[in-house]
Each structure stands twice: as C-alpha cells, then as structure tokens.
Image: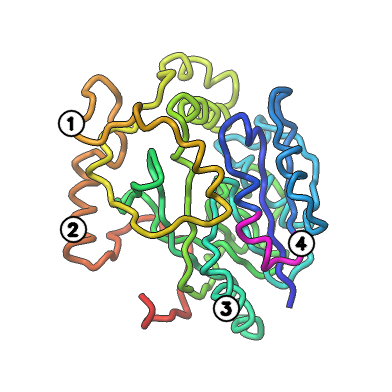
Amino acid sequence: MKISGFTFVKNATKLYYPVKESILSILPIVDEFIVALGKSDKDDHTREEVLSIESEKIKIIDTEWDLEAYPHNTIFAQQTDLAKNACQGDWLFYLQSDELVHEKYLEVIKNSCQKYLEEPEVEGLLFEYRHFWGDYKHYHQAHNWYPREIRIIRNDPKIHSWKDAQSFRKFDEFNNSYEDYSKKQGTEKLRVARIYAWIHHYGWVRPPKLMSAKTKSSATTFWGRKVAENELKTMPEIFDYGPLHKLKIYKDSHPKVLEAWMDKFDWQDQLQYEGKRNPNRLIHKHEKLKYRLLSHLEHNWLKGKQIGGFRNYQIIREEKNLF
C-alpha cells in the first residue's frame, strides 16, 4: 500500500500559513508529498519554507493561478487537482496548508487505509474537525462550521476537487473548466468511512493584521481582482475576532510539529476575552441569532447532529463505538 500526500499553496509565508508544519504533520505516513506551488509575490518565501524540510518525499509542481478562468475560489480546486493528478499512491491524503494532523492519529489513519484498501466501495475517509479561532485555546462548534470532511480519497481519475476545494466529488465527465468545478449535475458524493481522527484547522489563527490581509486575498480569488477593488476598500486593516469567551475551550495538546510556530503567538493583547462585541463592525456569521440558536439546539439536544448543513459525502462505514 502506498499513500501520497498533496496540497496547493501560494504566498504562505506572507499570509501566515503554517505550510511547513502542515506537511510535516503527515510526512511520516506518506510515501510522497506533492505540492502545487503557485507563483508567489516577490516578498514571499514559500518555496524556501517547503524546501527547508529537506525530504526526498517532497515534489514541487510550479503553477500560475488563472483567476479569470477559475473565479469564485474554484482556482483552489483546480490547483488541488494539479497536485492530485501527480500522485502515485493507492490512497491520496489531502491537507490544505492551514490544516494539521496530531501525531497521535497517524497510526489510526494508516491502519484505516490498510483496512479499507480492499473494499472498493469505500472511496474516501472522513475526518472530524476542530476550527480554531483567534488563538490556540478557542475553537468553533457552531452550526456554520463543518464538523467533518473528506481528506483521504482513492486514486481514482473520476474523483476531483470540488467548488472551493473544501471537498471532493466523483464526475461522469470532466473537462477541467470552472463550470465543472461548480456543478452538481453529473456528479456523485463519495462513499466514505468515518474514522476516529481529527484535522486541526488553524486558518483563523493569525495576527489580526495578517488575518485581514488573508480575508482581502480571499475576496480577490472569489470576485477577481477588478471586481474586488471596491470591496477591499471597505475591509478593516485590523481583523476583529470578537469575544472569544463564548467559544469552546481546547484542553488537549496540539501537534508537536506546530510548537515552534505557536511560540510566535504575540497578539493576545489584540484579542477580546470578555465583554460584548464591537457594534461598529460587521457581525460574524457564528454571532448571528439564527446560527446561535441552531448551534445551541444541535449540541444540547441533538447530541451534535447538524440540522441541514453542508454534507458532501455518504457515510457507509463508521466506528460507532469510538464516537
């Protein structure tokens, strides 16, 4: 059995992505790691960061992002596919460059890959998620945050990244266009096994100024450079995470490979740990009454089961005794 790791990335050091730590977190259990490296800005050092790992497993594919051909963040899916198509493994382990796996789950993941290798009906493995917010102690368990997602898929040419690369689908026909990455017709949800392993998502743990820079970058990849110009003018220079004391507290450890990265945490004085939100800023989605009520209902009455929500998979295997 061979496992390939893969990701896409651009301007990681400039926008505070722990891409090196992300790769290192699963490097022990993969036989290769493919990185689709987009042409970054001159003041970015993503290539040097990736190469500093000094592993023969890592292979870089140089790319250029075409935001006009792939708008609405489908450029992420197109870049993900470029890395995926270069993988040689039986299983393909996808991590976005702000996602890490704790070392305590590596054996579980590898064993699951071996367990389902000869069960072709299982097309992917489903992971649980922790979405950290503001710092490394607070995370979301709100209705608007996806609780689990596919991160390992079979090496099947019919499987492609989908929409903004959060997930995957199986396609009857695929022509590598924006329309393909956006459509539901002619596609199928993957049949997956839900495994007892978590992805730690750190995409919303950045210094507030760099978090604002990241949101502006996301607006550009979604709307395109020209359309996004007016929206960028209205975005604040310093991101306001809002009151953190209403979020869940994380009491376990973080991946060891993230320890040096976490030592750079120096923006606690810019965070709000008590009190009410600033009424002069736009409200975050998780702060809206609708989502607060749904979240309360799901976690206090429905044992974590979501009402509706994004569910781009079909669970056919599950270690029920572990959850």
From the image, tell me which residue sits under label 2. 297
Residue 242 in the figure: left or right of residue 177: left
Upstream in the sequence, badge 3 or badge 2?
Answer: 3
Looking at the picture, tell me which residue is in the foreground, 288 or 248.
Answer: 248
Marks 1 and 4, how far apart in space? 48 Å
Circle on res. 32: 4
Circle on res. 112: 3
Marks 3 and 1, how far apart in space? 44 Å
* Amino acid on which the number 2 mark rests in the picture: Leu
* Amino acid on which the number 3 mark rests in the picture: Ser
Q: How many marks?
A: 4
Residue at the image position 47 percent from the left and 80 percent from the top = 317
Upstream in the sequence, badge 3 or badge 1?
Answer: 3
SS class, disc 3:
helix
Vertical arrangement, residue 235 with respect to residue 115, above or below:
above
Which-is-in-front pick, marks 4 and 2? 4
The answer to whether the residues at label 1 and label 4 have Cβ atoms under 8 Å apart is no
The answer to whether the residues at label 3 and label 4 have Cβ atoms under 8 Å apart is no
Vertical arrangement, residue 26 with respect to residue 196, above or below:
above
Marks 1 and 2, how far apart in space? 22 Å
Bin the neighbour count of mark 3 within 10 Å (Cα to Cα): few under 14, some 14-19, many 20 and up. some
Marks 3 and 4, how far apart in space? 18 Å
* Amino acid on which the number 4 mark rests in the picture: Glu
- For the record, the magenta segment spans 24-32
The answer to whether the residues at label 3 and label 2 have Cβ atoms under 8 Å apart is no
Residue at the image position 36 percent from the left and 47 percent from the top = 137
Residue 135 in the figure: left or right of residue 160: left
From the image, tell me which residue sits under label 1. 276
